[in-house]
Image (spheres, grey):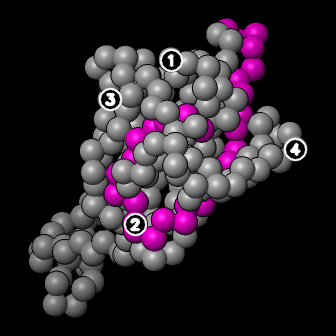
Amino acid sequence: MTWQKLSVKTNSSSESITLPTFGAKKFIQILANLQNASSDDAGLQINGETGTGITSNAFRYSLNGGADGTGTSGKSLPIQISAIDTFFLSVLYGINIGSEEKLLITFCVEQGTAGAGNAPTRDETVSKSTLSAQITDVLVSDSDGNQNSFAIGSNLSALGTDGGEVNYKIQDGAVFEETDTNKHYIYSSTTGLWTLIT
């Protein structure tokens, strides 16, 4: 399975962050390296579903391995729980099949107080969206559906795949050198085999 870069946005000023629309894929990854400019948590809103009337998301989360918390009829998909205004890295994995609920797993590490004497914060979240259309655009908000501002250099990226194999065509007569043994092999497209060159 080969992942493809779908969309990237890096802030050049302190502003909200929205990914340009991307092509739908069955499997997606969202990578968020953000510095929240407010003391709100951060979440994703998808497919242009913005504002305070959203109720299509549900989630379960744990902060630093503690007891689970839940949220239903949510306005966003959580990617940061503790609402700390320092840099955080979130990695979201999702299944993105049309007409099905979107199921997502998110791991987040937050810098917290700077310095080696202070441990980072760990968030773990599973969530779902009941929207039937495949996810093709993403913006970052807080849990109330308000768009936050993020520091210069904050980055949001999307990767995707449909899960198929990638078939590479090897040119007839290609030569491969095995560096450990210093042996050379030649490829035959007729037989599909590599033959030792003597």
Estimate how packed mark 2 is, as few (under 14), some (14 to 19) or many (20 or more) residues with alpha carbons within 10 Å.
many
Q: Amino acid at mark 4?
A: Ala
Looking at the image, residue 190 lies above or below residue 11: below
Start-end of magenta stretch: 115-143
Q: Image point 33% across, 42% down: which residue?
A: 19
The circle drawn on residue 10 is 3
Q: Earlier in the sequence, mark 2 or mark 1?
A: 1
Where residue 11 appears, x then y in whole percent?
A: 33, 24
170 vs 113, nearest the viewer: 113
Q: Amino acid at mark 1?
A: Ala
Query: Residue tagged by mark 1?
Result: 37
Where residue 82 appears, x then y in whole percent?
A: 70, 29
Q: Image point 38% across, 28% down: which residue?
A: 16
141 vs 164, nearest the viewer: 141
Q: Secondary structure at mark 2?
A: loop
Query: Residue tagged by mark 4?
Result: 67
The circle drawn on residue 134 is 2
